[in-house]
């Protein structure tokens, strides 16, 4: 009656021994040109090896190890002098070129240079490695674990970045081979290019705590109160106010700040309740390609 030998194979990758593993079970390796499956010398003394790949006999190395260069089913029979025989097979899955990946933008812009983008165009970064956990880095620092998908929206980074400043992004993935880094970094400059402003249609300069001035507000949602007037990077604001009969009432030049009208005319006197027309001139995208804009409309002024 033949006895079954208990033999453990040791996977060698780039000459570094990996954790010992029973060769009867399937396993997963990160293949390199030097990947071999070898056995301790004590286990192969005076033994005859027959290596098979997908039921076909294959050659092996002088030390009875076999070099792995293809995915498939490898089987092995060992016969020692005592005629004890061990045979079996395992399925080998290898990973090689598929984890060689880059970070890209959701546009067709070249990544060879610094990329300028508008926040309103919803810039996002991604990789082709959708099946693995991602670790995103901003300027060399690891971002929060909640951002572990294969895409990263720049809008989600507004608390971490500055407009008109270069920031670079890269990623790592975690797979069976460990942590694998992307081959590149993406350097991105983001600006608010359109900077849409909304205007209220009513204001009440009556001295209470609410709605005492007439001024634009930014249409971005979910902003903290202190951020409402700094998100939009426009400049050179100028607002003119007219009565409903066309009489010029006030001019407000506010440079980088939102223009704010307090309901006084150009002589510092309170104007009467009623409907007033306004015209606001301003610039957007001031850091890359400045564009002059103008908005007009009317507002109801109440004092009670």
Image: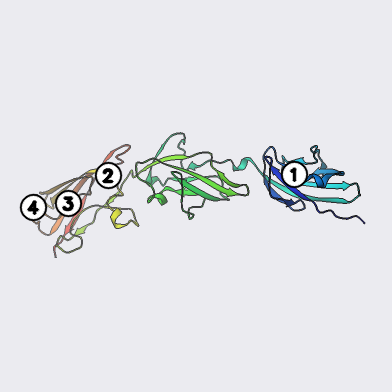
Q: CA distance from mark 3 to mark 2?
A: 22 Å
**Label 3 belongs to which residue?**
277
Badge 2 local density, few (<14 within 10 Å), some, or many (20+)?
Answer: many
> Which of label 1 and label 3 is nearer to you?
1
Q: Which is nearer the N-term, disc 1 or disc 3? A: 1
Q: Which is nearer the N-term, disc 2 or disc 1? A: 1
- Indicate which disc residue 234 carries: 2
Residue lying at 53% horizontally and 42% vertically, measured from the top left: 182
Q: Quadrant of the C terminus?
A: bottom left
Disc 2 is placed on an element classified as loop
Disc 4 is placed on an element classified as loop
Q: Which is nearer the N-term, disc 1 or disc 4? A: 1
Q: Which is nearer the N-term, disc 3 or disc 4? A: 4
Q: Residue furthest right?
A: 1
Q: Is residue 130 above or below residue 287?
A: below
Q: Which is nearer the N-term, disc 4 or disc 2? A: 2
**Label 1 belongs to which residue?**
37
Badge 4 local density, few (<14 within 10 Å), some, or many (20+)?
Answer: few
Image quarter of residue 98: top right
For this rendering, which residue is in front, 246 or 253?
253
**Label 4 belongs to which residue?**
268
- Residues marked 2 and 1 touching at CB (< 8 Å): no
Compared across the picture, whether 114 is left or right of 174 comes to: left
- Residues marked 3 and 4 touching at CB (< 8 Å): no
Q: Which is nearer the N-term, disc 3 or disc 2? A: 2
> Which of label 1 and label 4 is nearer to you?
1
């Amino acid at each position: 009656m033949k006895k079954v030998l208990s033999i453990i194979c040791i996977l060698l990758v780039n000459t570094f021994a990996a954790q010992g593993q029973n060769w009867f079970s399937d396993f997963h390796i990160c293949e390199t040109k030097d990947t071999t499956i070898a056995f301790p010398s004590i286990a192969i003394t005076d033994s005859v090896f027959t290596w098979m790949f997908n039921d076909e006999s294959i050659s092996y190395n002088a030390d009875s190890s076999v070099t792995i260069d293809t995915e498939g089913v490898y089987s092995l029979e060992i016969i020692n002098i005592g005629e004890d025989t061990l045979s079996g097979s395992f399925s080998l899955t290898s990973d090689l070129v598929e984890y060689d990946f880059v970070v890209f933008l959701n546009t067709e812009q070249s990544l060879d240079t610094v990329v300028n983008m508008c926040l309103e165009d919803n810039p996002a970064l991604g990789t082709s490695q959708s099946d693995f956990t991602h670790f995103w880095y901003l300027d060399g620092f690891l971002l929060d674990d909640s951002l572990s998908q294969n895409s990263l929206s720049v809008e989600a980074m507004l608390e971490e970045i500055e407009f008109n400043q270069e920031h670079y992004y890269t990623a790592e993935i975690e797979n069976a081979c460990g942590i694998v880094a992307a081959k590149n970094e993406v350097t991105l400059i983001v600006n608010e290019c359109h900077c849409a402003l909304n205007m209220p249609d009513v204001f009440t300069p009556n001295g209470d705590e609410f709605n005492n001035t007439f001024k634009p507000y930014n249409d971005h949602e979910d902003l903290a109160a202190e951020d409402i007037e700094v998100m939009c990077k426009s400049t050179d604001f100028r607002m003119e106010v007219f009565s409903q009969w066309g009489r010029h009432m006030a001019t407000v030049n506010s440079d980088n700040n939102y223009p704010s009208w307090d309901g006084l005319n150009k002589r510092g006197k309170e104007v009467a309740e009623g409907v007033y027309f306004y015209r606001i001139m301003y610039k957007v995208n001031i850091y890359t390609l400045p564009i002059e804009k103008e908005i007009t409309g009317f507002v109801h002024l109440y004092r009670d």
